[in-house]
Amino acid sequence: MAERIKRLQESGVIEAYTVRINPAALGMKLSAWLRIRPVPGQLAVVAEIIRDLPEIAQCDRVTGEDCFIALAHVGSVAELERVIDRIIPFAMTNTAIIQSSPVVARSPLAAVKHRA
């Protein structure tokens, strides 16, 4: 088993080992997805702002009308507003507050097994 794990690490299938932290247990009881569309010429500025916001847990550059989709964890609506206020001078945003998560960080292995 150790050899197989080592091969998976060396081939890049296993990139890292991690823990899953419950944001609500740390007082961040509100999570939201932010769709972000920078105004023309501000893509790099918006990317830097997003990187500098500690409330942003994940951000992906995407295709479509928006350029970024970011996951924010905050303690209140007021905190969420402050995060959005940092971005809106340079981008339009659309925010969706997460009510529940029917699928939480599923491994891609489930899809690989299903395809086989």
Image: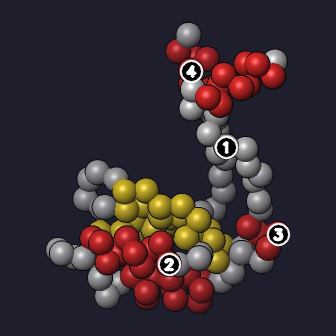
Q: Name the residue under label 4.
A: 112
Q: How far apart are marks 3 and 2 (CA)?
A: 23 Å
Query: Alpha-carbon neighbours of circle 4 within 10 Å: few (<14), some, or many (≥20)?
Result: few
Q: Name the residue under label 2.
A: 52
Quick one: SS at disc 1?
loop
Q: Which residue is drawn at 40% across and 75% down?
A: 48
Q: Which residue is drawn at 66% across and 22% down?
A: 7
Quick one: SS at disc 4?
helix
Q: Do the residues labelled 3 and 4 touch (CB within 8 Å)?
A: no
Q: Do the residues labelled 1 and 3 touch (CB within 8 Å)?
A: no
Quick one: SS at disc 2?
helix
Q: Residue at x 25, y 59 (%)?
A: 65
Work out whether residue 60 or residue 73 is closer to the camera in this orientation and state it: 60
Which image quarter holds the N terminus? top right
Residue 23 image position (x, y, % from top left): 73, 67
Precedes in sequence: disc 2 or disc 4? 2
Q: Which of marks 2 and 4 is in front?
A: 2
Is residue 112 shown above or below 38?
above
Is residue 28 shown above or below 96?
below
Quarter residue 4 falls in: top right
Precedes in sequence: disc 1 or disc 3? 1
Residue 17 image position (x, y, % from top left): 73, 44
Q: Nearer the viewer, mark 3 or mark 2?
A: 2
Work out whether residue 1 or residue 46 is closer to the camera in this orientation and state it: 1
Task: Indicate the amino acid at tag 3.
Answer: Ala
Precedes in sequence: disc 4 or disc 1? 1
Query: Alpha-carbon neighbours of circle 3 within 10 Å: few (<14), some, or many (≥20)?
Result: few
